[in-house]
Amino acid sequence: MLVKDYMTRHPVMVDPDMSIVEAQNIMSETQVRHLPVTGEGKRLVGLITRQRMRIPPTELASLNVWEITRFLSNLCVRDVMVKRKNVITTTPDATLEEAAKIMIDNKIGSLPVLEDDIVIGIITEIDMMTQLTDLLGGNEPGVRVTIRMPNRKGELAKATGAISDQGWGIYASGGVKTPKDPDHWDCVIKVRGVSQEELVNVLKTIEGQEIIDVR
Amino acid sequence: MTASKKDTLKNAVNQPSWLTKMWERISIVFESKVALVGLIIVLFWVTVAIFAPLLTPYTPTEQDYTAQNQGPSRAHPLGTDSLGRDIWSRLIYGARVVLVMLPISESFWLPLGTAIWGVLLGLIVGSTLGLMGGYLGGWIDEVVMRILDAMMAFPVILLYMIIIAAVGASATNVVLAIAIVGIPGIARLVRSLTLDIRTRDYIRAAETRGENPWYIMFVEILPNARGPIIIDAMLRVGYAIFAMGTLGFLGLGMPPPSPDWGSMVAKGRQFILSGSPWAALWPSLAIASLVVGLNLFADGLREESLRYQ
Amino acid sequence: MSSEQVKHAPILKVKNAAISYETRYGDVEAVRDVSFDVNRASTFGVVGESGCGKSTVAFGIVDFLGANGKIVGGSIKFQGRELVGRSESELRKLRGDQISMVYQDPMQALNPSLTLGTQLAEVLTIHRDISRDEAWQRSIGMLQRVYMPDAANVMDRYPHQISGGQQQRVVIAMALLNNPALLIMDEPTTALDVTVEAVVLDLIEDLKRDFDTAIVYITHDLGVVARVCNEVGVMYAGEMVEVGSVEKIFGDPLHPYTQGLMRCVPKLGSTKESSTLYPIKGRVPAPKDRPRAACIFAPRCDYAAERCRQEKPELFDYRPGHQSRCFYSDDIDPSTWEPPAGLVSELALPGNGKQTPDQPILNIENLKTYYDQESSSLLSLIGMGEKLHVKAVDDISLSIPEGKTLGVVGESGCGKSTLAKTIVGLETPRGGEAEFLGFDLSTPVSERDVNLIKELQMVFQNPDSTMNPSYTVGHQIGRPLRHLGKVKKGEIREEVHRLLNAVRLDGSYYKRLPRQLSGGEKQRVGIARAFASQPELVLCDEPVSALDVSVQAAVLNLLLDIQREHNTTMMFIAHDLSVVRFFSDYVAVMYLGHLVEVGPAENIYSPPYQPYTEALLSAVPIPDPTAEQKHIRLHGTVPSALNPPSGCPFHTRCPRRELLPDNGAICEKEEPPWQYNTEEHRIYCHIPLEKLRKFDPVVTSR
């Protein structure tokens, strides 16, 4: 689960000297919200996002309709982009969690992925969400069961053991600490090829664990 | 039979006549401005050489002691030399020897000039040697090429002087000298073309038919090498004219008093500083313009033919 | 990645592109109205015959059209950005950073005077702040990534010191060092042997997956398309006539041209008895003859109606994601197609009834042809050096029954052509015997009897050099008649017309010069010339490999017709195993001057296989994306014929050695025995026949 496996390679990139209007066209054409700005040899020089393209209202107020058009057509990417030193980036060998943490901490939606200062990809919140759904098997058919189990060694093994004893297969699972209850974990398991009753009948026999959701 | 006859008739309609084909060939000259300029210069000299007796009232050897070392005038458009001979007449009669006639003896001459005969002779011998070296290969190639290499080791002008000094100065000997000096270069060119062409499948097809090597060399290979050979020959005519000028200048050209451009320059040279440069200037210009014209023509043709290959 | 690919916009979007070339007769539109999309991690194949504008499209994307080419209309969007009308410097930046090209000839992209390492490392150091050492290390990594054997040492070599397949891998590695979003490949494997091609195609497939690169792949080979492409665009005369996924294009072709192409190529396993190739009638119109307001394919189409000649069809979505430029794609059912009269001659019927007992007409015993090569030592300068031999043909024994065809297959440099040249007398054998119609074949052609020469003729590979450019067609066909004295002087002209007729050319060709003919026509003239003396045996050295598929079908049919008419015996040399299977009764497989398997065609293409035959068969690109093919790849390169391996020549690369005790120690020491599977089918291998018989067939179609 490294960034390099989940990032979008070959992101759409723009030149610093490109006009804002053209950059906007590219954004709508490709439906991309974050454009790394690169110079010669795909070297990162900045980042431009949709918010960045908005002109501050204070500045707008001072202009009339004709001037806005002219103002816009003269503006180029270099003028509005986040400058290189302020762009937060990651590397292809970072883990997905590390990248996510950076994004949360800085409240940003995307991270250009750099190798030697050269853009090789971009990872965005959408990529993260996609991984979350895939992690929990959101796109696959099957029975999804949430089990609350005590925070002890071997508890997860009991549940998975019971499932594999029946010859069923797990193809997605994930666990988080139960909110407001440090002594328990909530575990989501997705199982293929069973009905809900069969799965519940097997799992409810396990001592100390509680099925809180089946769907 | 009727079917094939009908086909033949149809061909006659479909196929362009030889006239249009010729025109297509010639029109390539007009594609290139360079070639056209060259052609005009060359044609100018050919025309004046052919019609020389009609273009001047004087003969080239007629001396007028009342008018020596004069500049251009109405009577003598380019002036006269130290013996009072009309330079214009000498120039255009000199061009005759170079371009349109080869005097063998007093009364007998062949059409085409000395330079052209020299190159043609060189072409015949050089091509044969080149074809043999390139196609037959083996020891023939080794021997022929080593001998030609040895010849090429001599500076060209030295080679000319050796040959002329050995056999004496006359028009036929100049032809011989031009031919001998040209052979190594022509042979090398033809050999390299042959080495390329002999790998083509149609040569192998001829070999599998059991064709005789001479047939393959002259009928299958040589026609396909003609383009570069013709262009090379034109350049060589230019070099030959240049060489004839040099030989004449050194006193190894046509025996006096025949109008030889090189010896005209040599004779006129001493009067340049005494205020009458005409006798040396005009023949120099004549040599230069003809050589440049031939070079331009050949270069232009080469470029055009490469472009539409 | 799978689920989110959908959300990405295509890397490249080409819409109604039109490209023209300026010539001295005015502008010529080479490509018009071409539209397609290329997605990330996907290969878009552009197929079509030569002269259809495939390469023009590829070069047009990055505006590499040369001084006289220009894009005259439409839009080409790369990553949302319009490329048409960009300045040269912007395009150059894109070409350097995000778009790479791989050409057919790798030497075009490599500098012959620099080491490969220098050239590779330079790609990295030019833009990045990394040291030369690190760039060097990374280049080695990339070379390993493209499966270059001995990558570290290759870095110090010059381009000419590695083989063609390796050069192409270096070029691909160089293209990938930039991590391009789009890779344009123009016939990258056309110049390579099948086994090498198979490895390069695998490589392209892997790289597409690992680097998420979008690839535009240009080729004329339907088999290659079926193997590497996800989407395919079929081009005809400068237009895209059909676009769709590879399964749909091959499984359910909508456009009559695509259907015609499919009928032109022999499937691996089809034979001349069981199937017929149907060439497409007519030929591709020259750019200036292309109609503006009519279907461009109408003159060659069997379904053309009045509407097709008056109105130009647009690319229409007949099925989701599958477009065709035809008005009637819904009404055309290729399975009910009937060949129009005259397309295939009536002679092309299975079996000519003349079942003569198999009397061999040509017998070769232990034939050896060596080329001398001086060693590079000082001694050889004075003629005392050790003589080295290139063993081009080594110890070959075979025979061809009268009226049958023997196909000879093998990679380039295996001695196929030398074998043919030896038989025809252009090379003199060093040993062994060869006998044909009672004549001894060990003499060179110059010493042969004219009656022998008459009976033994050859058809050559390259249509552009098979005819002497200085003489007319009539003269060149007439020459063997005149020279070999087969007909009387006065009848030569008539005979030439008869021969022209036999190769389906009308009398007007008599006076034409070779440059006025197309490749297929030149090849027909070459065939007419070879058959002029009515030979008993004709050697065909790759007669169709330089031709387009539709022309290839016509030429193959022609050869079959003439053979059936005259009961001619043929030796058919080719590297395309499908064509050989189709055309031949017997097949001989050669490797490094040796024969490794010989037998009736159907036996060669089914187990037991000689391991080399098996590898060759599994490398052949099959024009059927649903066919299952065994995955056997040969590693390393063909050893030098100057110093061939001891024992079995194939032991250095054989993937089946482990079947023998000691991992095939015997293969290195002893020459393998000839094992007879049937009386006619023999295999040159140490592995016992029982084991070889247990192999699965290489190709199974679903």
Image: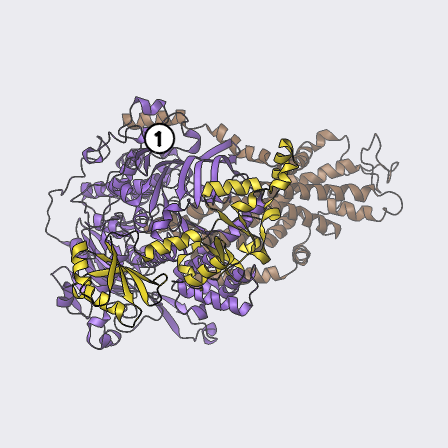
As drawn, the residue found furthest toward the front would be A180
Residue type at numbered disc 1: Ser
Give the colour in which the image draws chain B: brown
A83, A25: nearer the viewer: A83
Question: Chain under label 1?
Answer: C
C404, C107: nearer the viewer: C107
C593, C684: nearer the viewer: C684
Q: Is residue C441 visible?
A: no
Q: Residue at x 30, y 45 (%)?
A: C246
Colouring method of the image: by chain
Quarter of the figure with residue A201: bottom left
Give the colour in which the image draws chain A: yellow
Which chain did the renderer colour purple? C
Residue that carries the numbered disc 1 in the rendered image: C508
Residue A9 vs residue A166: left or right? right
Quarter of the figure with residue A44: bottom right
Q: Is residue C196 visible?
A: yes
